[in-house]
């Protein structure tokens, strides 16, 4: 590099590697790219190198040369591929983890300006990384990485009957007055009108509605969880278009529990029969949606007894006028209140958020200690991850088996 990175940005093409060596006439994947890079690709002859480089360039969108920030690497389970194309380097670029545990050099493909590398990591590995180009940290090329394998229950299974997802009419709430929201209901293939079903409610439901149905299909078919109707509810939107998420999710009150029990579930029951005993009801969420799920069970433990919490925001987001009204209070409330009949599966990671509202890893660890002190039925999986759903989704089937482990499932 010479005086600055400005000329570099103008010339640089960044890309995510996602295909198979061009010699196979198939898209690259991290694994097939890894095989293509075995040996000494820097000594590839012209045609061979250009063929592989051309296959990579074919994946680069027309606007990529104008990007000021490198996209994320291509992640396929535990295999991760990095790559970029850049001319006039005095040495090959490097990928370096911010914590210094990893450092590896990208391999040049022949005499082209394409550099690539593939690395395999352990399950649950997580770290921040950046490019080093000609000895200098390239601030526009960085990110965070978190890798897991995909559980088989997340993939369609041949003998599992498929349920259906029904988009419900847009809902206008009276309890959260002036808000509207889309929402969806999953109906398992095994549902029968004469047999009320269990129910599991998901906050931020616009995400889980896309991946939960296949998991429900597979686990219900195997008898690992009961016949369960899934209710996927996003946060409300106000008339002025502003989101109502934090007010609904982070506030410590019974308002959201009433919203679920007095508005949403009765609407579901106009078409489908649900069980009303607390052992047959679960509620789940991520981040603020997770503390919301806990609050529903805390306020109405005789209505919901099972909670699934991912990277829960048990922090002081809803500070209120006292600047101390937020979810961090649960740590003390759980210890000072007679134990409630709630079972909770918690997940968090050491790289979760740390900001003015609190430290998420510490908050979740502290909450788990309070649950243990008060004698709750809980499980806490603490990994290395960030504020994401990656770890939670990787262990989701095990989480559901644990939550429903002693439920009598009718064959």
Image: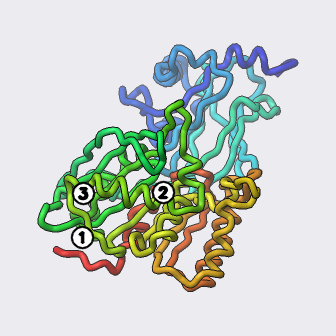
Q: Position of residue 135 (x, y in %)?
A: 82, 33
Helix, strand or loop at label 2? It is helix
Q: Is residue 329 above or below residue 132?
A: below
Locate the C terminus and report the quarter of the image it occupies.
Answer: bottom left
Which label sits on residue 256? 2
Which of pointers 3 and 2 lies earlier in the amino acid sequence? 2
Q: Position of residue 258 (x, y in %)?
A: 44, 60
Q: Position of residue 20 (x, y in %)?
A: 42, 33
**Quadrant in the picture for residue 14:** top right
Which of pointers 1 and 2 lies earlier in the amino acid sequence? 1
Locate the N terminus and report the quarter of the image it occupies.
Answer: top right
Q: Which residue is at the far right?
A: 3
Inter-mark Cα distance, 3 to 2: 18 Å
Write the residue at 49% across / 17% down. 47
Q: Position of residue 100 (x, y in %)?
A: 76, 51
Pick the residue in front: 148 or 95.
148
Q: Which residue is mark 3?
A: 269
Q: Which residue is mark 1?
A: 223
Helix, strand or loop at label 1? It is loop
Task: State whether residue 323 appears in this view.
Answer: yes
Write the residue at 40% across / 49% down. 233
- Name the side, left or right, on which 101 lies relative to 196: right
**Quadrant in the picture for residue 383:** bottom right
- Name the side, left or right, on which 264 lies relative to 189: right
Write the residue at 47% across / 19% down. 58
Task: State whether residue 151 appears in this view.
Answer: no
Helix, strand or loop at label 3? It is loop
Pick the residue in front: 270 or 187.
270
Q: Is residue 392 above or below residue 106?
A: below
């Amino acid at each position: 590099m010479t005086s600055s990175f400005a000329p570099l940005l103008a010339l640089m093409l960044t890309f995510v590697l996602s295909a198979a060596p061009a010699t196979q006439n198939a898209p690259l994947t991290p694994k097939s790219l890894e095989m293509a890079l075995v040996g000494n690709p820097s000594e590839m002859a012209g045609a061979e190198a250009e063929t592989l480089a051309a296959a990579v360039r074919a994946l680069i969108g027309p606007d990529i040369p104008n990007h000021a920030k490198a996209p994320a690497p291509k992640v396929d389970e535990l295999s991760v591929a990095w790559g970029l194309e850049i001319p006039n380097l005095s040495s090959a670029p490097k990928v370096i983890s911010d914590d210094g545990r990893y450092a590896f050099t990208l391999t040049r493909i022949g005499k082209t300006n394409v550099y690539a590398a593939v690395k395999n990591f352990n399950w649950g590995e997580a770290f921040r990384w950046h490019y080093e180009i000609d000895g200098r940290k390239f601030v526009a090329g960085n990110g965070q990485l978190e890798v897991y394998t995909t559980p088989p229950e997340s993939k369609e299974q041949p003998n599992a009957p498929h349920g259906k997802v029904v988009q419900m009419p847009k809902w206008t709430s009276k309890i959260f007055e002036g808000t509207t929201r889309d929402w969806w209901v999953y109906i398992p293939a095994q549902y029968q009108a004469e047999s009320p079903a269990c129910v599991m409610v998901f906050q931020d439901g616009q995400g889980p509605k896309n991946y939960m149905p296949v998991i429900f299909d597979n686990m219900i078919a195997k008898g690992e969880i009961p016949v369960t109707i899934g209710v996927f509810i996003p946060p409300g939107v106000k008339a002025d278009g502003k989101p109502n998420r934090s007010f609904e999710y982070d506030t410590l009150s019974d308002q959201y529990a009433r919203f679920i029990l007095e508005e949403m579930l009765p609407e579901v029951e106009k078409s489908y029969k649900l069980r009303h005993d607390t052992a047959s009801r679960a509620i789940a969420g991520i981040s603020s949606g997770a503390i919301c799920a806990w609050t529903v069970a805390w306020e109405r433990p005789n209505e919901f007894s099972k909670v699934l919490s991912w990277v829960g925001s048990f922090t002081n987001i809803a500070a209120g006028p006292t600047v101390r009204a937020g979810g961090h209070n649960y740590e003390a409330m759980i210890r000072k209140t007679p134990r409630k009949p709630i079972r909770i599966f918690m997940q968090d990671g050491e790289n979760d958020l740390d900001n003015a509202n609190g430290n998420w890893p510490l908050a979740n660890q502290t909450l788990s200690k309070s649950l243990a002190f008060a004698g709750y039925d809980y499980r806490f999986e603490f990994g290395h991850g960030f504020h994401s759903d990656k770890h939670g989704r990787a262990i989701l089937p095990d989480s559901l088996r644990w939550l429903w482990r002693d439920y009598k499932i009718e064959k």
